[in-house]
Image: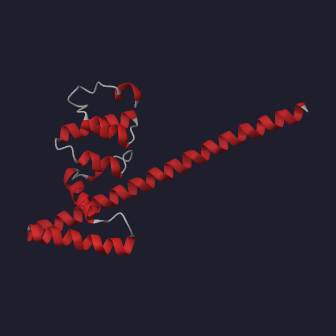
């Protein structure tokens, strides 16, 4: 009976270690895929902006380009490429023009929230706080909306996020 109890404990211990390995691998794979998509959206934004800057930046052409891309990308790749999201990709490139500055800890939803922060220094503050605090998008949105930066970074999220 004692041996069976010890075997059960050993199996449980091994199971917990194997489970942790798998969870870590899945989490890493998920983050890698998310960041690859963030990079893809940045590159799409870059292509759109470069096309517009070749003298075709008139409002009518820009809207036509975004709508046309949206329709075709949705047909070929499914949802996620509606007009507003393609427009966000364009804005993403303009808000973060240096691809090496993109942070793998942040996903597309983080970046969509951060793009709305006009001031680069404030945006950078939120990026650093978000990464340091391992914030999901909800705490990030709350901090942006409650002017966390302006309060010196001191509010309830400093202790609970």
Q: Residue at x 51, y 48 (%)?
A: 27
Seen in the picture, residue 144 relative to 68 is either above or below; the reply is above
Q: Is residue 57 visible?
A: no
Where is residue 146? Give x, y as percent.
Answer: 25, 33
Seen in the picture, residue 63 relative to 153 is either above or below; the reply is below
Specify the color scheme.
secondary structure
Numbered label tally: 0
Q: Residue at x 22, y 60 (%)?
A: 90
Q: Residue at x 37, y 58 (%)?
A: 37
Judged left or right of residue 40, residue 7 is right
Res 87 quadrant in image? bottom left
Q: Is residue 25 visible?
A: yes
Judged left or right of residue 107, residue 99 is left
Where is residue 114? Give x, y as percent.
Answer: 26, 45
Q: Viewer-proximal residue, 34 or 85?
A: 85
Res 130 quadrant in image? top left
Q: Residue at x 10, y 67 (%)?
A: 59
Where is residue 154? Give x, y as percent.
Answer: 29, 24
State which quarter of the image contains the C terminus.
top left
State which quarter of the image contains the N terminus.
top right
Judged left or right of residue 72, residue 60 is left
Where is residue 118? Give x, y as percent.
Answer: 17, 44
């Amino acid at each position: 009976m004692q041996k069976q109890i010890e075997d059960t404990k050993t199996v449980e211990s091994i199971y917990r270690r194997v489970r942790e390995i798998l969870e870590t691998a899945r989490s890493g794979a998920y983050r890698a895929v998310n960041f690859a998509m963030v990079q893809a959206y940045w590159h799409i934004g870059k292509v759109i902006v470069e096309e517009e800057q070749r003298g075709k930046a008139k409002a009518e052409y820009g809207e036509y380009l975004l709508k046309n891309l949206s329709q075709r990308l949705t047909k070929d790749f499914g949802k996620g490429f509606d007009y507003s999201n393609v427009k966000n990709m364009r804005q993403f490139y303009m808000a973060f023009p240096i691809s090496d500055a993109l942070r793998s800890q942040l996903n597309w939803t983080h970046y969509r929230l951060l793009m709305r922060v006009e001031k680069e220094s404030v945006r950078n503050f939120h990026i650093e706080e978000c990464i340091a605090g391992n914030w999901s998008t909800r705490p990030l949105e709350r901090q942006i909306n409650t002017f966390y930066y302006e309060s010196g970074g001191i509010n309830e999220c400093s202790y609970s996020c």
